[in-house]
Amino acid sequence: MTPHALGIHRSLDPPGVLPQTARRLDATPRALENEIAVDVRALNVDSASFHQLLDTERATGETVSRQILRIVAERGKMQNPVTGSGGIFLGDVREIGPRHPDARTLRAGDRIASLVSLTLTPLAIDRIRGVLASSDRVELDGMAILFERTLWARMPEDLPEEVALAAFDVAGAPASVLRRAQPGQTLVMIGTGKAGLLCLAAAREAVGPSGRIVAIDPSEAASGRARGLGYADEVLSLDARDPVAVQSAVRDATKGTMADLVVNAVNAPGTETASVLAAKDEGTVLLFGMATSFSAAALGAEGAAHPATLLIGNGYVPGHAETALGLLRRHPRLAAVFAGLSGAGGP
Amino acid sequence: MTPHALGIHRSLDPPGVLPQTARRLDATPRALENEIAVDVRALNVDSASFHQLLDTERATGETVSRQILRIVAERGKMQNPVTGSGGIFLGDVREIGPRHPDARTLRAGDRIASLVSLTLTPLAIDRIRGVLASSDRVELDGMAILFERTLWARMPEDLPEEVALAAFDVAGAPASVLRRAQPGQTLVMIGTGKAGLLCLAAAREAVGPSGRIVAIDPSEAASGRARGLGYADEVLSLDARDPVAVQSAVRDATKGTMADLVVNAVNAPGTETASVLAAKDEGTVLLFGMATSFSAAALGAEGAAHPATLLIGNGYVPGHAETALGLLRRHPRLAAVFAGLSGAGGP
């Protein structure tokens, strides 16, 4: 029997479930007939997860490196047990099973990135070479497995590796913004980290010159970067954990109309209600921050009698990886900022 | 200055936050200009909270009555400090502020229920008249405050009180189904408890005779009830924590087309991926179960490379309480099943 296209055959505990649900995966580093085995060079850890690992390091003294080694040894995958989130990897194809759909186009040695979460990716680590806290990046030697339906992308030759990887990691968000935002609309972007900046570029393309964009971030550095790029009409240095302050500031910034589309790409908890209150009654809230609480969003809307449409950002939008690279190519100043944030060529 | 529409002016500790977030509210029992004061007759305590109070009574001897009096005296609201949850209340309007939007339609003496959680509702208790453990209900004399934007509903005269309260509790779900489902569509309903049954009636009205409805519930009793009501073309006794089994069963039941709309109203965790895999690529998944995990839904879709639209069910849809009562009136057999499930008129 052919191994399952979604990798169920690799789930050890419990068996028979999808690998994402499993507590532990079989990370045996050899490709079955419809799998790809990859020599992993680096992980881009999900931002919410990386921050939690840093918090734990500060609280307990267990370094981020040791935590990652422990988690991957226990689980056969890099799924943060607190945040539940993962990240993506970069590596070189080692071996491709003869029945994998890409068996004819992909070759050993090709450099690729995974486009699905590490939470479902069998992973074994030989050694960690370095942790780059500034870019949520972990350099290591290891081996990962891609299943028949696991998404991956070939690394582009015209963009620095770190830039492409960082863009792939958040590619679902700007692709969703391009699909949903309409010319002339008012959009509020909460969080102007890497995902937020890509979303802002996508938002300006989608709403056009007649649209209005307001960006919010508590960090002076992050809001300064967003201001410098010029996609937003207004950038507010505000903490989105304060729904009252956000609602009032967005009311002022939109002359009372509030937002057609609110996009949340914050990696800290507690920003759900502010996101809801920034939207028009008939507006849409698109939640991409992996620290989002389902019940906080649902009850926040109900408690405020706010009928906004609440969307869980889907990390997969067809063509999202190429869409994100296309944004960086069309916006060289954004690509330069991205390079700085991702540590590419920087100090 | 007009008191805040969401009640921030009643938050004492800390001041300036939304009342749901506050540890203590000002429960002064008089309506400000945009508030309603209600003579409370009964609380329907959230089931998780009520069970915790019973556990404490067994452990410490402090009765449920005394615990409720203590909590409400300390906090100015009935928010269980252990579970964090509340419930809803039933009462008679005492006083309505002249600037409240319902000042012209609501009168002193009208019997109403709150449609938002007790966790954000200022409450003062004079005395507790009785505790009905079988229905998580506390009969009492007290006073509650509704803010300008707090949702409430008039109690109907033609339906038993318990039936109306149970319908109000889940009213957002069927109202959302009526808004989203289109004639001729294929709909999969996961979970056939009270919310699920109301959604099934709404779904049949919305998709019409040419639509196709498949319902899924692991409980033989619950799926038997759904089968007996006849809204679904097929009712499958399946556990939605098994996404592989659900995907395969829905594929068979829909002749391979999968669902335009999947509605999840399950109160257990782990059913997100099954919900995603039951949908068409261009389908929508509407999640109403409060045990839903945001990251499990987002990553489940990404992991399977499934581009479905993922919606957090908003507990508030304009007119949702009347919509739910209307469904019960148009479907008397459903109302009878609801009465049985809610203990109305029973022994």
Image (cartoon, coloured by chain):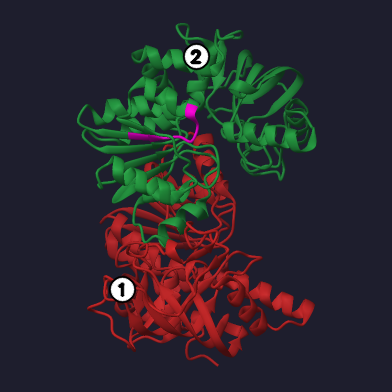
Chain colours: A green, B red
* Residue B337 visible in the shown view: no
Q: Is residue B188 above or below residue A15?
A: below
Front residue of A179 and A60: A60
Can you give x and y, in whole percent of width and height, for residue B158 in the image?
33, 87
Check residue A29 for magenta coloring.
Answer: no
Residue type highlighted by circle 1? Glu
Can you give x and y, in whole percent of width and height, for residue A284 in the image?
34, 46
Q: Residue at x 66, y 44 (%)?
A: A16
User: Disc 1 designates what residue?
Assistant: B322
Which subunit holds the residue at mark 1?
B
Residue A69 placement, left or right of A288 = right
The dot on residue A339 is 2
Q: Is residue B129 above or below residue B156?
A: below
Q: Which residues are magenta?
A: A214-220
Q: Residue at x 41, y 61 (%)?
A: A302
Front residue of A254 and B190: A254
Q: Quadrant of residue B181?
A: bottom left
Check residue A217 for magenta coloring.
Answer: yes
